[in-house]
């Protein structure tokens, strides 16, 4: 069965996302194409995984500049998706460089997040 791919329009970018599973939603920031291949499908039995592109993986719909990829903009991609999906509490997961985004997001809205997972990164 094919996965339903959805999009969020953000600042001239079309960001793809799709979700699997139920229960606590966990937004995995990075690539909606790559990360489903490396995260265990068994996780979907316990939590809802939302695989989300950020600006770096999205389709640009208008000209952009370097400020389009600043950390705050990428953090806002997570928040816009959370709001579109009408999710109250979320977990944020980031692997490698995306762990910095998950870590930063957790500091922006701590009342919204449940557990955070920062995989394979040295964080302060």
Image (cartoon, helix red, strand yellow):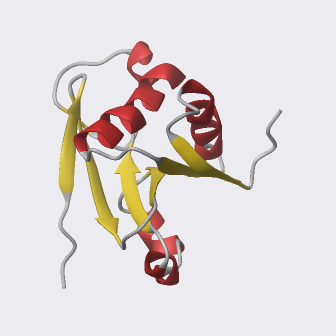
Can residue 55 be seen here? no
**Residue drawn at (29%, 54%), measured in percent from left and top?**
17
Relative horizontal placement of residue 58, taking residue 79 as reference (left or right): left
Q: On screen, 41 above or below 6?
A: below
Which one is nearer the viewer's eye here, 116 or 100? 116
**The N terminus lies in which quarter of the figure?**
bottom left
**The C terminus lies in which quarter of the figure?**
top right
**Residue drawn at (45%, 47%), measured in percent from left and top?**
89
- Counting the numbered discs, the total is 0
Relative horizontal placement of residue 111, taking residue 9 as reference (left or right): right
Percent x, y of residue 83: 29, 37
The quadrant holding residue 73 is top left
Can residue 28 be seen here? yes
**Residue drawn at (56%, 25%), measured in percent from left and top?**
108
Which one is nearer the viewer's eye here, 37 or 75? 75
Percent x, y of residue 55: 36, 34
The quadrant holding residue 79 is top left
**Residue drawn at (49%, 38%), measured in percent from left and top?**
112
Q: On screen, 90 above or below 107?
A: below
Percent x, y of residue 52: 37, 50
Q: On screen, 30 above or below 43?
A: above
Q: On screen, 100 above or below 120?
A: above
Percent x, y of residue 4: 17, 67
């Amino acid at each position: 069965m094919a996965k339903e791919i959805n999009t969020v329009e953000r600042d001239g970018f079309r960001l793809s996302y799709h979700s699997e599973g139920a229960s606590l939603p966990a937004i995995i920031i990075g690539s909606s194409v790559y990360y489903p291949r490396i995260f265990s499908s068994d996780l979907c039995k316990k939590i809802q995984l939302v695989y989300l592109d950020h600006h770096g993986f999205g389709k640009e719909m208008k000209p952009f500049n370097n400020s389009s990829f600043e950390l705050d903009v990428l953090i806002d991609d997570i928040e816009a998706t959370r709001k579109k999906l009408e999710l109250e509490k979320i977990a944020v997961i980031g692997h490698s460089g995306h762990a910095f985004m998950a870590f930063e997001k957790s500091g922006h809205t701590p009342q919204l997040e449940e557990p955070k997972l920062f995989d394979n990164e040295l964080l302060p």
